[in-house]
Image (cartoon, helix red, strand yellow):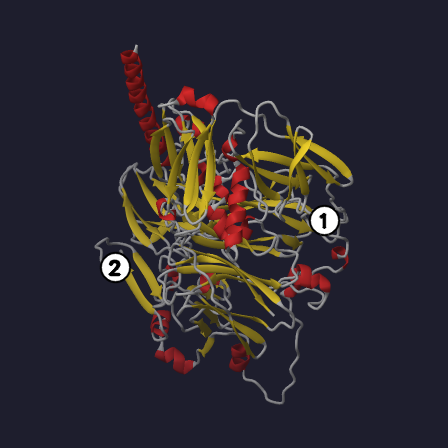
Amino acid sequence: MRLFILFFLLISSVNAQSTFQNIEYNFEDFAELPREQIYTHINKSTFITGEYIWFKTYAISRDTKETSTRTSNIYCVLTDNEDKVISQKMIMGINGVSNGQIATDSTFKSGDYTLKTYTNWTNNFKDEYVHYQAKIKIINPLEKSFDKSLKSNKTIDLQLLPESGHFLANVNNKVGIIAKDSLGRAVSDLRVRLFKNETQISEITLNDKGINIFEVTPDKSSNYSAKYSYGGTDFIVGFPETDFQGVLLHFDNKEELKVEIKTNPNTLSIIKRQPFKLTIHNSVDLISYEFNFQDNLNQQFKLSKADLFSGINIITLFDSQGKAIAERMIFNYDGLDISTIENKIINKKNDSIEIKLPFKKLINTDFSSLSASVLPSETKSYNHHENLLSSILLSPYIRGAIENANYYFNDISKEKKIELDNLLLTQGWSRYDWQTIFNNPPEMTEEFEYGINYRLSSNSDKNETFLIYPNFNTKSEILEIPPNQFVEKVGFFPINDEKLRIGKREKNSLIGKSNLVVDFYPNRIPELNSTEESISTFNSNQLTNQIAYEPLTSLDNLQKLDEVKIVKTKEYTRIEKLQNKTLGKIFDFDEDMKRSYRTFAQFISSHGYYVENIKGVRGENTPGITTFIIETRNPVSINGTKEPRIFLNGAYLVDYNFLNEFSMRDVDYVEVNKGGIGEGIRAGAGVIRIYTDTNKKPPLTPKISFSEYNIPLSYNQPKQYYAPKFKSNQSQFFKEYGVIDWQPNLKVKNGFITFKIPTQNYPIKIFIEGVVKTKSLVSEIIEIN
């Protein structure tokens, strides 16, 4: 009989080993695809129609903790409270960061909206929260529908949640209490009395997060309950059902992590010498420990913080059959790469304030990208419950929403670490369900996207040569396509309403329209394929009608300046008058100028531009296509386009080949704006405007020597921020709902981020999010009095 028992135990041990190996193999499959975690910093959470919603998105690779360079296509979708799409766009991610804006106008109804940001790659993880979504509130002053006060009713949701999910008889149990009102907000300072049968055994008060912890050793024959009063009414809540048999996890998370696996005498005889496995994972990596119960009712592990993952640790207990029977989340602050701001330096300069924020122990960095929202210190319009740290390090692992998740990562203290540990005790099992890990790991159905790809298909039975004209982010290119074949191009970055222009070499070596078929991918914004969500703002009292009667100045009107008439005694020449109207330089083509510069190429090459008439592509031997090349030596776009924008009599020249041997004989004057100042982002390589003499014969009409192809999906170009004007920036309304500045592209230089804001005569708050050193996260709130 004893031999049989030993043989049975041996077989059980071998089977358990195989089962435990499957746990690790399945986890490796589950974690194989890298997660790209998205966070979006929105400049406010409450907007008045007429304002822009300004935002910056950060994509962080969860495996490396660095900004993601794999994806350039960031999708931004704004939906109303019925999940109807109100606005959608694609913005360009460069080194894992991107910024954009969404305009609101009078067609927006007052109410709650949701901004969702994601990538095509995130759609591989429909059961996970790797995208980002935040609720915002929009107020239309012309409506009164928002003039309602949402109040919680007189009932609350109070739950008693035993640590690791079990309430086990005859064992000391740690139990969390969490209370929320009908709007999902924490019920703070609630007094709760605990009873065994009809005898009070303890009394605790919930903290300002509506949470507290107590310990109790239940027996199977007694009834346990919690009693409290709320809104003048008494309530009773029963404890979880007491288990007669079972195993639970107990944690003491202090300087080191003490892990106890507890059972009771009723269970020990059943599980004695059976193998168990304790795993610790963070959705990327997994470590494990195996043990069995001997004659003791508990097993103990002591783990230093260095033995744990930085950030979240999901600790799961498996029985000998490979079944997950208990789980608890622990957060480890040690080893987190967080950069902090030491203090602030404020300098008043004329009508602005220079703000310098030094980073602790950070002098130089190869990469930094931060965003800052500057608001009055009394603001009520910045109620985001997430910041970059909580969104990357905590929320993806929690089921449901966390009220004020950012609280645990602002001014981190010993008390906040304890409060977060208590919160995690009440959360129970993590968002990462083991049935999904075992049976339904994510599959790569979607790819990382870097730009727009397109296919050029030829229907010709001849070999043909084509010229692809430059766009803002791409240079010109000559290519050959064999008969009835196609060529695929990748990494195309069109912005706004740009078109793809392609010309074909004709028999006379000139360029004509192409006959290619062009297919683009992606050609639409994909839907977000996720069942998981996190709500970063909770319902609260709606705003009162004071907002409706202090409207924002129309943003359209902000751009209209009153005409100022200046009376001077001096008589201006025609050229002086022209010069006063432009930021560029005016060149008057009198007879001397026309003798000096016979062609446009001769003139412009003497004024800071490289010009060449070439056949084929420079450095190649492709003959037959004469192309007019003009470049500045100071490219500004990501792919280095150097081509300025050229206009003839106010009309943009889409085909610069028209300028081959362009005579300056009939030119009146030329305006050269080398920096493109005042001309928009497309003018980074400069703007040249040619005006002919209206008293002479009209210039030749440029021949359109290409075909244009509409691009179905292009990048939305970031606008330059400007603050909307309120009726008064001294009113209480402005102090609560106004905006001062938005800085989406801050960099660390010599250990500082530096920027200027208009002079203010009241305290302000600066909400800063970002990344430095490619992987060090920043979430700071700076107050300036």
Residue bearing mark 2: 618
**How many numbered dots are placed on residues in this image?**
2
Say whether residue 155 is left or right of residue 2: right
- Of 83 and 21, the residue lying toward us: 21
| Amino acid type for the residue under numbered disc 2 | Arg
Say whether residue 363 is left or right of residue 533: left
Say whether residue 537 is left or right of residue 631: right
**Quarter of the figure that contains the N terminus:** top left
Residue neighbourhood size for the residue with mark 2, other residues' Cα within 10 Å, grouped as few (<14), some (14–19), many (≥20):
few
Work out whether residue 91 can be spotted.
yes
- Where is residue 550? Give x, y as percent: 75, 60
167 over 775 or under it: above or below: above
Say whether residue 210 is left or right of residue 709: right
Work out whether residue 121 can be spotted.
no
Q: Secondary structure at mark 2?
A: loop
Which is more foreground, mark 1 or mark 2? 1
Measure the alpha-carbon separation of dots 1 and 2. Answer: 64 Å
378 over 591 or under it: above or below: above
766 over 299 or under it: above or below: below
When asked about the image quadrant of residue 267, the answer is top left
The numbered mark, 1 or 2, whose residue comes first in the sequence reads 1
Outermost residue, bottom side:
569
- Where is residue 288? Give x, y as percent: 34, 35
Which residue is found at the position 59% from the left and 63% from the top?
765
Residue bearing mark 1: 542
- Of 727 and 524, the residue lying toward us: 727
- Where is residue 399? Give x, y as percent: 53, 37
Residue neighbourhood size for the residue with mark 1, other residues' Cα within 10 Å, grouped as few (<14), some (14–19), many (≥20):
some
Outermost residue, left side:
621
**Quarter of the figure that contains the C terminus:** bottom right
- Where is residue 184? Give x, y as percent: 65, 41
Q: Secondary structure at mark 1?
A: loop
